[in-house]
């Protein structure tokens, strides 16, 4: 049976048409996600919250938050999810252009873009010709993507764009974004790990999600009456992506086998055991 996502993070039916399993439906959900964290806020968590808030400010300034309806948007979503299997700078640039034109400008696609363009930096140079034709929301989204990519190629493109003073000043406050250096503190930061995997194929992204599940399961055992929505989202999205991608399934199963017996048993129950309808 297909695992059911936690109700608080259930994507809309239209959002599921983007073709890859996330827990956050669009940019605006980042605002509430940024407010959910553990009781003890570490410096890294504070940094992550600032990143989430920064992206939220961008997303709230955009009007392109309606769920995509078209078959082209569905195809782009599917292509994003398998990009890591046949990657190139040219394909990264092409998909970023398709993301904009299919109205898939969301927090997950922005972060996917930063990770693909960091790994294949020439993609920013190739995409730049298209960016110069964009206006309004499309230009804003692209400029933030370049700023958070942080490569020399992305900066060269960014410097060549005609942007208003307010946007330029906002972009100066953003540094390159590296999700695998940030803690998982919310469904949004969980999503950033998934799209990092889809962009780069780096198994560390999946393994960090499993590490989070181990840590959160241990904490949950001490608080049996507490409902951890991020943990529920992590388990649901991992099971769903394992069903859809054999590479992810293999990474998770191999990583589980490396864990101590107690953690291994909990992970097998959460991620591998059959679920009731």
Image (cartoon, grey):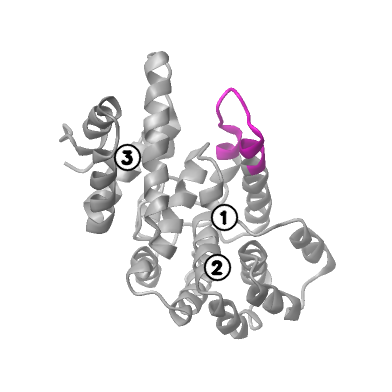
Most foreground residue, 261 or 161:
261
Answer yes or no: do the residues labelled 1 and 3 have beta carbons within 8 Å?
Answer: no
Residues in magenta? Answer: 32-47
Residue behind mark 2: 118
Q: Which mark is residue 236?
A: 3
Q: Within 10 Å of the Cα at label 1, are there few (<14), some (14-19), or many (20+) other Cα atoms?
A: some
Most foreground residue, 216 or 75:
216
Q: Residue at x 17, y 34 (%)?
A: 273
Residue 197: say if magenta.
no
Query: Does residue 178 appear to the left or right of 70 in the view shown?
Result: right
**For the residues carrying marks 2 and 3, which lies nearer the camera in this image?**
2
The answer to whether residue 25 of the structure is visible from this angle is no
In the rendered image, the vertical position of residue 276 relative to residue 105, given as above or below: above
Q: What is the quadrant of residue 141 in the picture?
A: bottom right
Q: CA distance from mark 2 to mark 3?
A: 28 Å
Q: What is the quadrant of residue 160 in the picture?
A: bottom right
Answer yes or no: do the residues labelled 2 and 1 have beta carbons within 8 Å?
Answer: yes
Mark 1 or mark 3: which comes first in sequence?
Answer: 1
Residue 40: say if magenta.
yes
Residue 100 coordinates in the image, percent (x, y): 53, 71
């Amino acid at each position: 049976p297909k695992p059911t996502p936690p109700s608080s993070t259930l994507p809309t039916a239209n959002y599921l048409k983007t073709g890859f399993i996330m827990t956050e439906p669009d940019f605006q959900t980042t605002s509430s996600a940024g407010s959910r964290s553990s009781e003890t806020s570490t410096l890294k968590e504070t940094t992550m919250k600032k990143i989430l808030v920064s992206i939220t400010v961008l997303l709230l300034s955009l009007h392109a938050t309606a769920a995509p309806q078209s078959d082209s948007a569905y195809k782009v979503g599917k292509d994003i999810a398998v990009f890591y299997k046949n990657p190139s700078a040219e394909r990264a640039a092409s998909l970023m252009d398709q993301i904009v034109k299919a109205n898939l400008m969301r927090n997950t696609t922005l972060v996917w873009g930063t990770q693909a363009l960091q790994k294949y930096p020439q993609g920013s140079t190739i995409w730049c010709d298209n960016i110069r034709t964009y206006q309004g929301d499309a230009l804003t989204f692209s400029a933030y993507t370049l700023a958070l990519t942080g490569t020399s190629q992305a900066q060269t493109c960014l410097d060549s764009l005609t942007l208003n003073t307010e946007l330029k000043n906002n972009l100066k406050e953003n540094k390159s974004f590296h999700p695998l250096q940030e803690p998982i503190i919310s469904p949004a930061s969980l999503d950033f790990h998934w799209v990092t995997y889809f962009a780069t194929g780096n198994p560390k992204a999946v393994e960090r999600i499993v590490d989070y599940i181990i840590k959160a399961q241990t904490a949950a055992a001490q608080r049996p009456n507490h409902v951890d929505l991020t943990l529920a989202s992590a388990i649901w999205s991992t099971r769903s992506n394992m069903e859809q991608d054999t590479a992810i399934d293999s990474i998770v199963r191999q990583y589980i086998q490396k864990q101590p017996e107690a953690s291994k048993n909990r992970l097998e129950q959460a991620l591998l055991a059959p679920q009731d309808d």
